[in-house]
Every structure is written in C-alpha cells, then in structure tokens.
Amino acid sequence: MDTIVAVATPPGRSAIAVIRVSGPQSLDITRALVHDDSFTPEPTHVVLKDLKTEDDEVLDQALITFFKSPHSFTGEDMVEISCHGSPVTVRKLLDRIQQLDARFAGPGEFTLRACRNGKMNLSQAEAIRDLINARTTAAAQQATRQLKGELSSALSVSKQQLINIIVKLESALEFVEDDLPHLQRAAVLDELAILKSTIDSLAATYQTGHLLRDGIRVAFVGRPNVGKSSLFNRLLSRDRAIVTELPGTTRDSLTESIAINGIPVTLTDTAGIREAGDRIEAIGVERTHRAMADADLLVVVIDASTEVQEEDREVIERASNSRHVVAFNKSDLPAAAENNDTVNGSKVVHVSAVTGAGLSDLSAAILEPFGTVDSESVGLLVTDSRHYDLLVRAVASLEESASLLKANASEELVLVGLHNALSYLGEITGETTTDEILGRIFSTFCIGK
Amino acid sequence: MIFDEFFDVVVIGGGHAGCEAASAAARLGSNTALVTINLDLIGQMSCNPAIGGIAKGHLVREIDALGGIMGRVIDRTGIQFRLLNRSRGPAVQSPRAQADRSLYRTEMRAVLEHTPNLQLRQGMVSDLLVLKDRIAGVSMQDGRQIGAKAVVIAAGTFLNGLVHTGRTTYTAGRAGEPASIELAEALKRMGFPVGRLKTGTPPRLDGRTIDWDAFEPQSADEKPVPFSFSTDEIQQPQIRCFIGYTSDKLHDAIRRNLDESPLYSGKIKGVGPRYCPSIEDKVVKFAEKDRHQLFLEPEGHNTNEVYLNGFSTSLPAAMQQDLVRMIRGLEEVRIIRPGYAIEYDFVDPRELGPDLQCHRVPGLFHAGQVNGTTGYEEAACQGLIAGMNAALTVQGRESLTLRREESYIGVLVDDLIRQGVDEPYRIFTSRAEYRLALRHDNADERLSKYGREVGLLGNQEWERFHQRRDRIAKVKKALVSERLRSSEPAYAAVRNLIGELPESISLAELAKRSGVETEHIQQLLPAALRTETTREDLEFALADNLYSGYIKTQEAAISRLNSHDKTPIPSSLNFRGMSGLSHEMIERLERVRPQTFGQARTIPGMTPAALSTLLVSVTVPN
C-alpha cells in the first residue's frame, strides 16, 4: 500500500491548514521533513516542529500529530500537519511531501482506505461524504448520527425481528419430522405488520431527510418591479441583489443559500418576466424560465399596492403547474382591490420586504408542500436515496410475503419476500448468512430426529 | 515402483461415497478397484437405516438423474416410503425411505459386483503413494502395493476413529471395526490440514421386548414416491414406524449422570452436529422442554432389531438400558447394541477444487465424511462427483462440476470448498438460494443432460427422460391454451369453490388460485389428455406453473448480481497491496490472475467480503 497525502482544509488563505498523510511511509516522511531520523512522536500527542527543505531551509513551523495504525481514521499510520494557512506554504509542503514518495490522494481515498480496513462500513462512509458536504447544522447532525451507525442500529432491531420470522418458517419447512411448535400464521402476520410499519416510518423520514441533504430550490418570479429582489435580500438578511425603483433592474439570475428550520434552501432571484426591451433583458428572461423549470418551488411575487395586471396573471398561470406560493408584497402600502379571484387555489401570503412583516409566513409556506418536520428537533432521518430505495423495497417485499401468508400459501413462497427484505436491509446493516439463520434455528428449537 | 496390481482408479472405502465413486469410475470405462476393510459391510448404514428427507431426498434424486446408483438401490430395499412436506409446495417436498439395513447392503454389493471394470478388494490402506507430486497408488497394511492413476478417499469415520461410551474409549472406525490410523497419519504427514469432528448413534433395541401399543404408529404412504426416475413401482412390503416420547424422570436421570458423559466431562474434543444432538444435549440445552420425540424404526423384515431414533448417546453402555427403560412402552426393553459417540479426523475441504480433487496432490480426490459432511446422501453425491472426475481425469477428459443455481449437489460442493466446515455439514433447502427451481421431481430436467454427456446415463434412462419431458410439455401447453369459460357447465362449480372468477380464465392462471387442487385441474383438461395424463406429470406441470413468476425474478436477480462481471481488473492491480484481503484470498487471486470481476467471482473459495473489497478497488477511481 502506498502513502497518500492531501490538504484536509478548504483551499484559500486561512489561519491554519491541515495536511494529512496516510500509509506505511507516513512516519518516515515526517522524519525527513523534520530532519530527524529518530523522531518518534507519541501517538495522538501534538508536537511543535520546524519543517525543512532538503537544503535545510525552514519551510514552516507546524504542529504534528501522529496516529499509529490501527488507531487512526484510515486504520493506517497517519500524520496530521497543522501548518500556517498560506497557499504558498501549503503548496511547498505538499511538493516536498510528494518528493518524499507520497502520492496525492484521489477523491474520497482516505475514506476508502478506512472502509477497506474495516474502520467503517459503507453506510458510515456515505455518512462521512454527507458530513463533508453538509450545508446546514441539521444536515451535519444527521450525517454525524449515521456515522455513529444509528441507521444501522435502528435497523438492526428490525433485522433481528425479521430473522426471527424467517427462522419460524424455515424450521417449519426443514424439520417437518421434528416435534416443533405449529406455525401460527396469525401471530406471524401480526409480527410482520409491526415490522413493516417500523421500516415504513423510517423510510417516510426520507421526505425530510433528503431535503436536508439536497435542499429545496426556490425561485422568485414575477413581472418587473414587484419587489422580488427586495424579498430575496430580506430573506438572505443582506443586500445581495441590486435594488432600484427602475423596472428591469435585475438582468441575470442570482443564487444564494439559506437555512429554513435547518433545511438548506437555495433562493434564486430572477429577472422580471415581460416583453424584453433589449437583448440582455431577453437573455435574462430566458434564464428566468430555466430557473423556473429547475426550481422545486416558485414564489410568485405580486405587488399588492397596485391592481393585478395581465402579466401577473400570466406568471401565476405559468406557475400553476408547479409547487408555488403567491406572495403579495408591499403589504406595508395601502392595498388595492382584493385579488382573490386571480389566486384561486394557490397558497397566498402577505409580506413586506420593507418592514419584514409576513416573512416567517413565507418561510413556512416554502417548506409546507414538502411535508417537512422541524429537522433540528426530530430523531434519525434517512437522508440517502440508496437507503430510502432499499427500505421501500424491503417494505414491498414484506407486503408481498404478508399477502401470501394471508392467502395460506406454502412457506417456501412466503419466504422469498422475507429473504429479499433481509438482503435489502443487509445492504445497509451488513449481510446475514444462511449459517446465522441455521444457527438461530438450532438454538431456538430442539432439532434432531 | 513395483506394484502388485495396477488400476486407473482406486477407491478407498465401501460406504455410500465409496460405492458411488467406484460405480461411476468403472462405468465411465476406467479400470477401477474398491478397497475396503470388510467386503461384507459394503453399503452399510452405520446409523439411521433411512435415506432421504428434506433436501437429502433432493440429493438422491440428483444422483439418480446423473446416473448414480443410490436411488435404485433404496427403491428395491426401502420398507417405508414417505413423501415429506406433502402439505407444502412442491419445491420443498422430498422423499424419505426407511431401508431394510441388511437388504440394502446385499443389494448394493450385488450392484457393484455386476459392474464391468470394477473389482472389489478387501484390505486396509495404510499409506498413499505419491510420485513426482502426483498420486501413484496406495500401500496396504498387509504389504501389497496397488498402483493407480487416481485415488478417491472415502474413509468415513474410520480416519483415527475413537469410540466413546461413558468414560471408556477405544479406537474403532465403527463399533466392532478397526480404525484406519496409518492412513490418517499419512494425510497429516502430507501436510493436509486435519480437524476433528464427532457424531453419535443411539442404542438398538430388541423388538420383542417393546410394548408397541404404548406408541403411536406412523404408516408408509399409500402410493410410495420412488427415488429413481427409472423405478416404476416400489415392490417391498411396507412397514409401520412408531412415535413415542421421553419423560421427566428420564431427563432428571440424565442430568444426574452428566459427569459420566464424555460430551460434558470434556473428553470429546471434536465438534458434533447441532441439528442431531445427543439426548444429553437435548436435555441440557432445551431444559424447558418436558419431553422429546422418539421414533422406533424396525431395521428390516427379518430382524427384531429396532433403531431408537432421537436417542443418540455417549453415556456408559451399562447405564443405557436403565435410562431407556424410563420411556413409556420400553419398561421391559433389552438393548441389543449400545449407542456411542465417535470422533474422527476430517480434512479441510477448502483443499479441494469443485471436482473434489486436492490442489495439493493432483489425482487424489476426497469424498464424504473426510470432507466434514454428515449423512449418507451427502456422502453419496460427493462419491459420484469424485469418482466421475477421477475417471475423467485419468482419461484426459474435461471435469464435470455442478453450479449452485442448478443443483443441491452444486450448493453442497460449493459450500464445502469455499467455506470449509466447523461442524459436520448437512444439506438444508435453505442453503440453496434458488430452491424454488431445485425440485426433487425436476432433477432429471436439470441434470440428466450432464449424466448423458459424460456417459453415465444409459440409453433406457435417457429415453425415459425424453418421453417424460414430452408428456409434460404437452400438459404445460394445454394449461396455457385451455380456458375455463362462463359458458361451460363446470364454471359455476369452480366459482362456488373459490369465489370471484373472470368470464374466461386459463387453466394455468386458475391453478394458481387458492383453493384449486390438482384434481380440479385434471377434471378440466380436455378428455383425451385427461385420461393419458398421470397425476405425477400434471403435478410437475403445475409446479412449473406455480413457481414460474418467482423463478423469472430470481433469474433477474442472478443477472443483477452479475452486473459487475465485465468490470476489468487492471493487470497492474497489486492484490498484496489491498489490506482488506486475507493471505489466502491473495494467493487464490494471484494463482488465477482474473482479468474481470466475473472471473474473480468464480474462483472457488473467494469470500463475499474479499469480493466486495476487490469490487471497491476496481470500481472506485483512485
């Protein structure tokens, strides 16, 4: 196994940058860096050292932490170097370490090594990926939970219940001559129903869980000068978009991220929709259409202080095929005539970008169609589409078995779905071998004609 | 080397593995000798006088479909035939027959004696002769040297066999027969990894001293289902067995005397089978059960000897009679032969390829208990595979191996050579991932082509197979084409039986509905077909019909599993550099040097864990 190196902190200038080295050569490389062949730091203790070039020139003064195999993230010998966060210093150090025979790590390679060395299972590795990419605190929390194997352990109870059911049916088939208790179909059906609903409700958390990971894309649309950019800025709590009283100020789509109830929401401010005045505006409008197509939800902004215009109606008409919320902006100004007839069937909120009134209503209205719960306060959520897919398949397989059981089908047919469900769960929690099932049979029942 | 005799194939042992091996090798045209310690005990049933049972019955039918002999011999000597799991689906039904122990032995020996190219030799093999790293023959205890191009070891429990009854131990291959100690030592000397297993057998009773009325009789099937595809009818008169139970008093007595049991005093080191526990184990491990089921099985038409199934024990012989007398109905019983436990050597089957040939010594094959299995059927099917491949090797022909998805034999061999054993290995239907496709009644459809190709299956059997297949195809076609329509008189009766019914339904669809029995479908067949179709053929067609949807899904799953098969493994990939791989896995990979993941997957002995490590390395970009 070769030794790999990578910068563990984000690129750019920072107070500290962390360089990680993993592999059998880690310590030797560090010794060469500090020009001390006998340098043997105590594992997990931090040491301050000068790092030098081949010509004894000091590159940087850095904190060095040694992790001895197998007690490291990857399971291999590892060294973490916390150096000063100047891109130049980091570059020089990396060059030097590569010279000393370390290879630049591929994406995810540290995690891959950890996986191979049994430091984590696949679902934990996936959680690390999510943790690194997590955009809000709640998403990070969820990833941390999976990292600790919570999904695995939440499922392991279900898995054990499933194995118990399988054991009952298998032993009825295999040991027909033994004096075993009769299969109680009704009781097994009850057990199956409980099992199914447990897995089902775990799968249902994906509704919120995947939003935690992937976020919601929201586009602000409307005719020019209704206050889309003002609302956008207000939600961001900063003056990101240029706002003037001139219609058509926003020429290009602008995208920024916020968190609502812990769920990452990407807001896109768009150019107002109207017959374009010039080519730039025409391109901007086209981008708006694209943003509308990409969005998970549209916020149609309407100026509440003026009469509803034909252009407003067109935008609402266009949005009506997608999830959307109609925001009557400028609620601080005297309202024009009631416009309820134009927003038939749409969710309506009244807001003021100027005073901030109604903003929490808008936030709630954005989340509402996704059926989310407050993700910061709930337990384990399924965030990965692969996990969700496996859980859904498991539930479907269990349903199939339950209906066969109800129809009095023979055990070998009922078992097909149960074994399938077990292997789906096994892809999250680790597989169950036939020997384990047989072992359970022999310890549960006295077999042996 | 000077040999007293020379053969193509020498088979060591005349048990169930040895008989199949010798018969197969000889019938494939190899000059074959079967060497055994006592010619009078060829085909001896050391333990239970029965063949078949769930999954085991499948093995026997597969042996028969390939052209083996066990099925035909038990069909001629079975005295109680029963098809087990009748109330369940056809895939998990399996025939079982109790044998007349002495008739079975005589019949098996007669079959072997009438096999051309096969010679029987009495004597004990004491060493294996190896020349230029290949097997060259065997040495006998009496000084004879027999040359051979291939040797099959099928020595059963004889390798370093040690019998235990109470605190007494003595070396023996079975009670009353000498153990094979020198051969066991020779295997160790050759470097084979050898382990120790244990099995046991119950006492045999004098039938004249049993109060039969205290037991519940169990009859044979009215219409016995034979094991062999070439058997038309079972001729042996059928007998009854009897079911009884142990008692609290007996359990207490056993618990009080546990220190007399070598199993509990720590004297026995070998691992016994969990699914065939001794009565001591039953009483200790399932203390909450107030009674355990026992079967009284008469050993034959012309003997008083009765096998006490369920009472395997290693308690002192002197104590056994008093214990057995605590069973209701056995108050006056006399024991003819005491039960005992036996420990014996086995060789790690991971030493073998799928043809059951040793990697270590080409030309040497292992079959039966030497591979860590238990059971006559498990032994016989390995004997068939080993004997057949021994002959094929000698003849320079390609070996014949079976896959998991097409046979229980394939499952058994694959499990052995990939995973090894840590307790005596027995077949179960749950070991077969694709059990819905592996029915006892379609073994011929799955395997007879191989038996024919290789030359074991005779013209007559092959002809029978074709006729049966054609008859069934006709029935299957009719099931799809024939429909029950609301205009027909039978329609109302069927609707009364099962409730809702469409205006028109094919018989195939109708047959899948709950409440519809085979007889109903038979009645609905067109008149001509109805009279010429046997119930057996119809059941076969209906079984195919019942499982067809599942089997299609399974096949899809198999191909999904194989979806990475074409993923290339770069020739530069260093297996030693992959720290998730054990030394053994690295060696296997380096020996084969697979170019695709599919090739790696089929290397015998690769564990799923090793494969997934490999898959990660070849699919995740560096």
Image: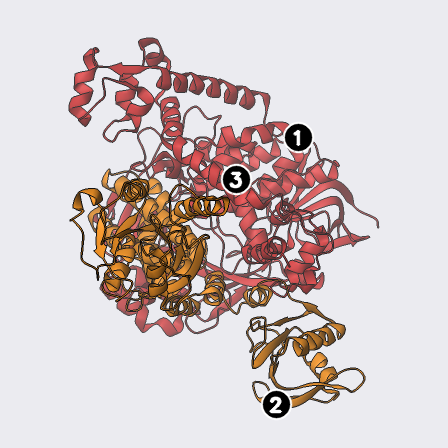
Q: Which residue does the numbered mark 1 point to in the structure image?
A: B116
In the rendered image, the vertical position of residue A153 relative to residue B58, given as above or below:
below
Q: Is residue A401 visible?
A: yes
Q: Which residue does the numbered mark 3 point to in the structure image?
A: B559
Choose the circle earlier in sequence order: 1 or 3: 1
Q: Can marks 3 and 2 be said to lie on one chain?
A: no
Residue drawn at point x = 49 percent, y = 63 percent: A129
Of tags 3 and 2, the one toward the viewer is 2
Q: Can marks 2 and 1 be said to lie on one chain?
A: no
Picture coordinates of residue B524, whole percent (x, y): 28, 16
Residue A253 versus residue B127: which sits nearer the camera? A253
Chain letter, orange in picture: A
Residue drawn at point x = 49 percent, y = 25 percent: B230
Of tags 2 and 1, the one toward the viewer is 2
Chain letter, red in picture: B
Q: Which residue does the numbered mark 2 point to in the structure image?
A: A47
Residue B194 versus residue A59: which sits nearer the camera? A59
Q: Secondary structure at mark 1?
A: loop
Of tags 1 and 3, the one toward the viewer is 3
